[in-house]
């Protein structure tokens, strides 16, 4: 279940978890600072592969979706800490990505949560082939006839919640299925820790995705994700944070969408207040004039919004 | 009320409108293609100017807020057309911008629409002084000690609705108080036309603003806005559109926020379908993988979200 | 336009208003205490009458819907007062009521505000015939084969807003298209006053309706509504109130629906606090344990919820 | 853990569950048809008992709230069945009920999901004493000086979800913390079954509650609840249903509140369609004119709405 090399722990799961679960046995145990190479399935567990597949049929045998690799036990992580996940790289395991229209799932259809009596939209699979040219990768869908840059990220990244076991389709305070493109190589994701060892799960890599993940299915890929962990003792955060070279970001997930916006910005105010010496009211003012706020997903069980501030605006004097 | 020069029509209002009103007499009448220089008040009609002002007191005499210059009658515009507004420039009329906390108004407080029994947040005024250095402008608030770039845009831009007269504090299909930073010089805004002459209103310029306009009050300025109009016969759009050099954008305004997101993306699908030869389903797919979606305002009577697509992704072959 | 009898003012409109409009000339002028008999059209202006009508076709010529009779000028009403409307009776002007499915309108379909890409639901007209038996009236739809009691009420009842002219399809602080079954004979409706004479509008009578008005179209009738007005000087209310023999009720209209719920209950707390000697916190407690909260409409431009308290629970000692 | 008598199984838990959990060992195993007397704690695990208690302090030691008795294994229940729970009686275990204001919890305050920067409302405990007079019980709060009838019901009633373990504070398809007053003696609650034995949980009895449970805390009591179970093979329902002598009811739980309304009515249409011979469109029409829709809770992790139809309106001919 785990192959250790001198410098990299490789995690090849024998089976997957469909919940972020504090009760499941760890599939690997790693040290902070170690590089960890994690194999991940796509959201459909590779059941959809060609434009001829019919999603409702291909998924009929799937009791659950969005398989997760995990939990990975991070030595030293304890309840009340924060887990920093340094995103190093995402390598595809196949030469194509898939998207599709699944009946009653997506942002411009009624769903089991936003019910109507209308017929479902037509089903359809889009295969996007991965090409490489002069060292830059891109994706091509022949039918539409467009190409888009390879900008991979991790759709689902979580720690096990406190007491609960939550569907891997859900985003939340624990991270989860946020579908936020800034969970990408080069950035660091911070997650709250409620369990010994943090109990980290990940999966659902995307070759790329627009903001909102409009139809509910990004460019889904199987992949190898390399990360390393750091444990921030007493880091005490309540919602996921992301840090890039230029920005501080917070992710709020809730319904209605304005509640996700409020969470994201309130958490970002707290971050700036606690670690950058702004008063709460001054932070509120700064974000009013210089904050960013985009939609990660508008399709999952709760919506995920990302609030941000450029670090250069935090320098005073 | 109107001073014509050979090449610019200057609109200096004698009084303001607090509604987007199809019944009000035009303050100016212009030809498509003419440059029009419009003087605008700030959202508080210049009642708040120093850090010592108390918003609730300063605004106690203001029966209505967000004064608009207009309507401007555009020759040749008829119901069913679209009005293209080329945004040329925004020049400040004073050396500072103001923001403030107004009781029970903003994104992180309860409001008259999202009611609670809690006390209001403290009131406070922030004055941001406009500086220029080597040809680039920026804004400084001495108390917080940060500086931000001058990135002016028009907060409120509208045509008169059909039959209704709607508060200038509201965004909607008619445009209005969208508070969307992409309504800025260099871009073109498209609005539906329901009345003879379109009946254009504008006001509420901002020296800059973060996405969401978090506390509800951006960096408010008095200004001179230069635009020109074009009438697109039978342009038949239903919600505002924005075009920049790189992007097509649509604005949806609604509550809850997910409804604004749905409108924005559904309108963008329609645009791509009608004018760029994509099928509806292919457009849905393209926006899933490459669309943008940010929050313009999360504080007004309805929330405004901006969906976008880079034009280079519309090229096929 | 107005025929006065000794004791009843009869208002037979020559044409209708499709907005709650402070600028329209009054169609009648009445004294407080006078009985006023108002003729009202149905929401479709009698364009739909048989099961063979196709709503989209029948309504194709209707630029606007929900015609209102008004404004009626009530002598003595001034801004800051409240207008009490005693609902006396509703008499049908024809022997049937109609309901129907209008494309993209209703509670279990996507709409122009909650957009999807799905096809519309099938159109269909339901005619419900009015029968009388031993002095009790009921409605029968032969196709479904059920009968329902005659429980008529007024779907739309409003005063003109302050400055704005708002579509007659909208509910709001001014009352409007609330579609709340408690606006019925025997009850008193209280509305804020923003204009001289209050400028009262009404229309859209329903033979009956379930809570929520699920498909968006109740049992629509043309009718004669008899009311009388009272002016409560300085009555200063902000949202509509309803009083029955047993209950105090407040109506909040907003989106999302929880905002309507918050408004309705916050207004009811204010009422109990101001007029029944409860502290704010005690009123909050009492309504927690004994309040009522039902959905009037889940289909209009904003949703209307009704909070209530039985008067017997306001007696202390 | 379980004391069997000839005709009643008494379930006295040794400890409680704070999640609806498919992995927890059953505390009792019962036959369909047996009467089961279940001891339940109150939502605060009896930590709040007097007007002098300070909720934030009393609850500081409580890692989790809303303790549940369960799971109870019902013989013969299998995935795909429905579990019918006949509610027989609720007997109080103490002579008083408590309600209180918990910081940042309730319907008229900001919360961790609907965040603001405002201060919390004041804390306060209300003790309501249970009196009996001529065989009828009522509750009196001496401070407010009002009395209210004893109308007890079960706030939380659930089966274990499929795969997930969900907080006992949450309502959902599994039932849970719906806080719906119609879960009361005399009525039958139907729940979906996802696990062998159904795995039934209950707790959180209320001496009474208004619609919406406005402040978030009803009249909380410890109690003995008597129920019996029936297994409906292949009963295949997706959301909870309630049946009284007069009505069919369905409960939808979601955010925003309109999504809960849509679920409740869509499920009720399905029920009428499947078991009462109405076409889908006719059921939509019937509920438009005769349905009921009230708010159970507007305070929990999702809002619960109850749609209903009088059974007499289902009789045709």
Image: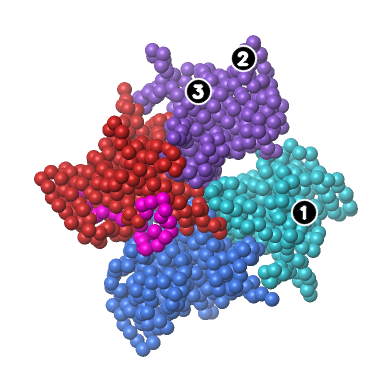
Chain colours: A purple, B red, C blue, D cyan
Q: Quadrant of the C terminus of chain B?
A: top left
Q: Is residue C178 visible?
A: yes
Label at residue A302: none
Let me know if residue B75 is in the magenta part.
Answer: yes
Residue occupied by mark 3: A186
Q: In which quarter of the image is the N terminus of chain B?
A: bottom left
Q: Is the magenta stretch mostly helix, strand or loop?
A: loop
Tags 3 and 2 both on a single chain: yes
Marks 3 and 2, how far apart at CA: 18 Å
Q: In this view, does D85 lie above or below A166?
A: below
Pinpoint residue D287: horizontal percent, then vertical percent.
53, 59
Chain label for disc 1 = D
Residue occupied by mark 1: D46
Q: Is residue C146 visible?
A: no
Splitting the image into 4 quarters, where does residue A81 fall? top right
Label at residue A8: 2
Marks 2 and 1, how far apart at CA: 51 Å
Q: Residue at x 56, y 21 (%)?
A: A225
Pinpoint residue A203: horizontal percent, then vertical percent.
57, 26
With C259 as the anchor, is D213 left or right in this view?
Answer: right
Pinpoint residue B240: horizontal percent, then vertical percent.
32, 45
The 10 Å Cα crowd at callout 2, few under 14, some 14 to 19, many 20 or more, is some
Q: Residue at x 72, y 69 (%)?
A: D142
Q: Is residue D42 above or below residue A160?
A: below
Please report the bounds of the magenta region as a residue range. B48-77
Q: Nearer the viewer, mark 3 or mark 2?
A: 3
| Between discs 3 and 2, the one toward the N terminus | 2
């Amino acid at each position: 279940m785990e192959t250790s090399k001198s410098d990299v722990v490789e995690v090849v799961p024998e089976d997957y978890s469909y919940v972020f679960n504090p009760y499941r046995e760890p599939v690997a145990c790693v040290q902070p600072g170690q590089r960890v190479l994690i194999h991940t399935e796509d959201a459909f567990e590779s059941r959809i592969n060609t434009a001829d597949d019919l999603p409702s049929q291909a998924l009929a045998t799937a009791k659950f979706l969005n398989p997760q690799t995990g939990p990975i036990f991070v030595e030293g992580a304890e309840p009340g800490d924060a887990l920093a996940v340094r995103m190093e790289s995402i390598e595809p395991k196949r030469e194509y990505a898939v998207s599709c229209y699944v009946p009653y799932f997506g942002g411009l259809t009624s769903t089991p949560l936003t019910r109507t009596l209308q017929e479902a939209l037509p089903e359809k699979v889009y295969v996007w082939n991965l090409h490489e040219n002069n060292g830059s990768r891109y994706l091509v869908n022949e039918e539409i006839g467009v190409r888009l840059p390879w900008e991979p990220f991790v759709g689902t990244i979580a720690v096990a919640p406190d007491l609960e076991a939550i569907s891997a389709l859900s985003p939340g305070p624990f991270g989860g299925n946020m579908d936020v493109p800034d969970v990408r190589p080069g950035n660091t994701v911070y997650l709250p820790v409620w369990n010994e060892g943090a109990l980290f799960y990940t999966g659902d890599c995307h070759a790329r995705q627009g903001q909102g993940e409009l139809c509910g299915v990004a460019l889904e890929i199987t992949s190898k994700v390399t990360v390393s962990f750091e444990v921030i003792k007493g880091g005490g955060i309540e919602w996921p944070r992301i840090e890039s070279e230029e920005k501080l970001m917070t992710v709020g997930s809730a319904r209605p969408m304005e509640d996700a916006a409020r969470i994201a910005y309130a958490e970002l105010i707290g971050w700036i207040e606690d670690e950058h010496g702004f008063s709460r009211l001054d932070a509120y003012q700064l974000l009013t004039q210089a904050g960013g706020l985009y939609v990660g997903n508008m399709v999952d069980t709760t919506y995920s919004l990302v609030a941000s501030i450029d670090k250069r605006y935090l320098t005073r004097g």
